[in-house]
Every structure is written in structure tokens, then in C-alpha cells.
Image (cartoon, helix red, strand yellow):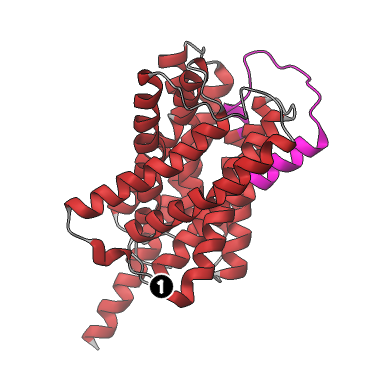
Amino acid sequence: MAVSRPSNYLSLVVAAICFGSIPVFSHYLNLLSVPTVQQAFFRAVFAVFYLFLGVGLFGAFHQLRISRAHLPLFLVYSLFGIALSIVAYITSMAIGTPVVIAVSLTYLYPAWTVILARLFLKEPLNWLRLIAVPLSLAGAIVVSLPSELQTTAAPIAGILWAIANGGFAACYVVFGRKWARLGYNPTTTTFWGYSFAALWMVPILLTFPLFVTDPRVVGFPLLLSPGAWLLLLIFALVGTALPYTLVNVGVKGIDASVASIILLLDPISAVVMGYLFMQQPINLWQFVGAALILLATLLVAVESRVFARRVSGAVRHIDKS
């Protein structure tokens, strides 16, 4: 595991707050008659524009170079870690899965990440992580509970899509750690990830209407209001380009399994923003869930800092001898 810094944790916390703004942006864009699939497409396209603009302002075009040998990895990364993650969530909602169930199952991704990171990155497991994962999952489920518990039947296919979405989100975190090991800059991986994801969205846009007919989900109206275009531009920056770049910055110094748990601060951010901007009440269950997530985040942060001090002490001991 790489030695972590406070900036790695701060990057992930800010990213989680930005991710929490996504439901707010999507809600107001739906009110402006922008279908969900169209929102996803322009999030990817405008994110690439912002990243390209940022690279140009800092004169860092050399950072966009990638090895041809890694091109297949980037294609897989952009498809599973970005494009299909968006599609899976949309599909789950579109075919009738209640929002609370879809969100809760999506937050299974820390468990997915621990498994994938162990299999492909050989990251170690310890008792603190094994405690933090179910603790954070419990918090994510509790924080998403509605104010009145309701029994709502969800289609099996919708449940499977929501679970798959958690797996796709874990792919993004695990690949971010892989890019760090290969020495790629976060700007590079985010830029090419979203560039290829935007290309993947073209066949997705063409095939999705074959399975979903809800106008709130599918459709691609070009005659949008100026307010809708402005909101899409802000959405792509705050809800996409900035947080995904920060995730890649964070995982450069933190194991993927640890990063995935810290990012569960996202539902806390979503609850607070929903209360502030969408007048959605905050109930006792959400406070309890937030406390569980914060406790899990504290556990993995302490575990990483203790490990970092041990590594640093060992290095100093070797230097003295």
C-alpha cells in the first residue's frame, strides 16, 4: 500500500461532496425537460472539454500521452468504470426499481472493491477493513431509508442492474489505483476515460430506446433552454470533471478498498443537499446512517495512517543501519 497524505483523504472527501450534488442537478434538469440519458451524454462530453481546457491553461498537453499497450485497458476502464455505470443506474430506475433500493444496492461497491482489489491488485486485507466494509454498507443503506418504511416490490432485473452498478463503480476505483501504479497522472486517466466513455455513449444512446420508452429517461432534444445548457455545463464540472479527477488524485496514495469506503460520504452529502435545495426532510435514520459511515471512514483513515507511520519508521531504521 502506498504511503498516504492528508491531501489524498481531502481529495476523496471533496469528491464525495461533489458526487452528492448529482441528484440535485439531475432533478432540476428533469424539470427543464432534459432526459436522463442526455444528461449522461453531455456530462461526459463537457467533462472532456473542461479537462482539455485545464490542460491547455497549464500547458500540460504532454500529460495526455498514453502508451499504445495500455489502450485496451483504457477502453475497458471507460466502458465498465464510466459508461456502463451510468447506464446500469438509469436502467435500474427506468424499469421500476424504487430509488431507495437502487441507491442502497449501488452502495455495495465497497464490498465489490475489496474483492476486485484483492484479486487484481493483490491489496492486503485486515480486520479493520473487514469491519469497516459492512459498517459502511449498513450506514449507506440506513441513510437512504425513507421517512416512512414502505414495502415496494422491485423487479428482479432492476435489482440485478443496481447491484451491477455497484460493481461498475468499484471498477472505476480499482482502475484508478492501477493507473497510479502505472505512473499515470490523474488528469490523463480522467481525460481519456471520459473521452472514450463519450464514444461508448453513442451506441448506448442508439440502443437504449429499444428497451426503455420513458421520455424522462430517453430522448435527445437539442432545442433546450439557455438555463438547461448552463446547468448542464455546471453539472459536468461540479458533478463529473472535478470529483472524478479528485478520486484519481486520492487513490494515488490510498488503497482502492480504503478509498471506496471514504467515498461513502457521498450519501451524507446527497441528504444534506436534498434538504437544502430540494426541501427533502432529514429523518433519524439518516442521522444514524451518517454516523455509521463516518465511523467506518474514521477506521480506515486511522488504519492507513498507522500503516504509513510503520512504513516510515521502518525506512528510517534501515537508513540508520
**Magenta highlight range:** 141-165
Relative image position of residue 267 (x, y in whole percent): 51, 32
Query: For this rendering, which residue is in front, 260 or 215?
Result: 215
Query: Residue at 49% of width from left, 25% of height from top?
Result: 26
Relative image position of residue 166 (x, y in whole percent): 62, 46
Query: Residue at 28% of width from left, 65% of height from top?
Result: 63
Res. 197 in view: yes
The image quadrant where one finds the C terminus is bottom left
Relative image position of residue 35 (x, y in whole percent): 56, 26
Residue 142 is inside the magenta segment:
yes
| Pointer 1 residue | 182
Q: Residues within 10 Å of mark 1 (few under 14, many from 20)?
A: few
SS type, badge 1: loop
Which residue appears farthest toward the front when viewing the image? 223
Q: Is residue 112 left or right of residue 292?
A: right
Q: Is residue 283 left or right of residue 101?
A: left
Query: For this rendering, which residue is in front, 106 or 22?
Result: 22
Res 137 → quadrant: top right
Q: Is residue 294 left or right of residue 216?
A: left
Relative image position of residue 120 (x, y in whole percent): 58, 69
Query: For this rendering, which residue is in front, 78 or 223?
Result: 223
Amino acid type indicated by mark 1: Leu
